[in-house]
Image: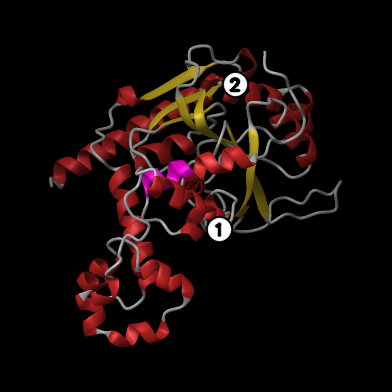
Amino acid sequence: MPKKTSKPQFYTQKEKRELIKTLLLKEPGLSSRMIAKNCFSTHHTVEKIRKELIKNGKITHSDPRPDWMSHPYIRKHPEILETLSERSLSSVRSLGVLDYMMAKNIKSPRYAQTLMNKEARAERLNAGLELSIDDFRLICGDIKDGFPEIEDGSIDIIITDPPYERKAVETGLYDALASFSARVLKDSGILVCMVGTAHLPEVYRRLCSDSRLRYHWQLCVILPRQAPALHWKRISTHHKPVIVLTKGLYKGPLASDLIQASTDKNAGKEFHHWGQDSYVMAELLRRFTSEPNTLVVDPFVGGGSVAEACVQANMKFIGCDIDRQCIKTTQKRIDELLASRATEELNNPQ
């Protein structure tokens, strides 16, 4: 058994350098500042590693557009050069940005690059995956038993919303979630866990109790209106925290840490009294996944909000819950969503 610790794990300098090398080999056209931001390093370090890789012949160039100033779009709109900030200059030199600006008649390099990245990501997520009922699996069981039906190291991402009350924390629910996540996640896999605020320090301690997991970040979900007041704390809350842990180094996309829930205050409640807004779950999925054929797990499936997000995003899904009624509700929800999708595709063939 791995040694357990209550302290969150952080990246070492060696791990940062390895992650920088991985990103440079995969996307040599990314700016050094962007890579540094993703790897918690400095752009000077990235440039040093970039030069080493060029010298060793592992990447062939440090500037993806050395001839960018002679591009037809720059010749047609030379006034763009007068307004370029340092960040815009980095964007305009990135591979394909000027071509995209010319095709879409866009004047801002950073805006063009943002649109390019969104389109590329959407294309990856929808690449050739035909979902069927076989891609959705439901298991009735207790998280404390570890769901042995799920193979070690087989899961890309866990998105879940466990019970918040003190009893759930004190009886080891979050410890069990940590052990389960550390076992089933792939290397660089992600645990995204929505939690309550009342017992947050203890929740953090227990989620970080397995040394195979490390703290990555905390997100904030802004609610459409305040939740019921916590009179014993004398607090009325307008948000929910989301804790993100990783197994090994984080290699996912750049993600914003603020989510605005939909304006429907009852979203998700028709399926479960503690149900969450499927829009929020879809946002969490979108922000932390970027590859097709991703396998998602929710070990507290409830009313199936994460399952719905997976249908919408073309992701395979395993849902677990101790409550058999939750399994039945989620199965019905999945069946209806897939049937509706099949009907829509039949009526609107490409």
Picture residue at 49% right of the left edge, 49% below the top: 49
Picture residue at 48% right of the left edge, 23% below the top: 327
Residue 321 x %, y % = 55, 23
Q: Is residue 191 above or below residue 116?
A: above
Picture residue at 42% right of the left edge, 79% below the top: 84
The disc placed on residue 180 is: 2
Q: Reply yes or no: does residue 23 show up in magenta.
A: yes
Amino acid type assigned to the residue bearing label 2 in the image: Phe
Residue bearing mark 1: 44
CB under 8 Å between callouts 1 and 2?
Answer: no
Q: Is residue 153 visible?
A: yes
Query: Is the residue marked by circle 1 packed among few (<14), some (14-19), or many (20+) residues within 10 Å?
Result: few
Q: Is residue 105 left or right of residue 225?
A: left
Quarter of the image with the N terminus in it = top right
Amino acid type assigned to the residue bearing label 1 in the image: His
Residue 45 x %, y % = 55, 53
Picture residue at 33% right of the left edge, 68% below the top: 112
Q: Is residue 29 above or below residue 337?
A: below
Quote the CA–CA distance across marks 1 and 2: 39 Å
- Residue 217 or residue 308, whichever sits in front: 217
Return the residue found at the far left.
Answer: 349
Residue 341 x %, y % = 26, 40
- Secondary structure of the residue carrying tag 2 is helix
Q: Total marks drawn?
A: 2
Q: Is residue 147 left or right of residue 333?
A: right
- Secondary structure of the residue carrying tag 1 is helix
- Residue 175 or residue 93, whichever sits in front: 93
Q: Reply yes or no: does residue 235 show up in magenta.
A: no
Q: Is residue 243 visible?
A: no
Q: Which residues are magenta?
A: 21-27
Q: Is residue 220 left or right of residue 46?
A: right
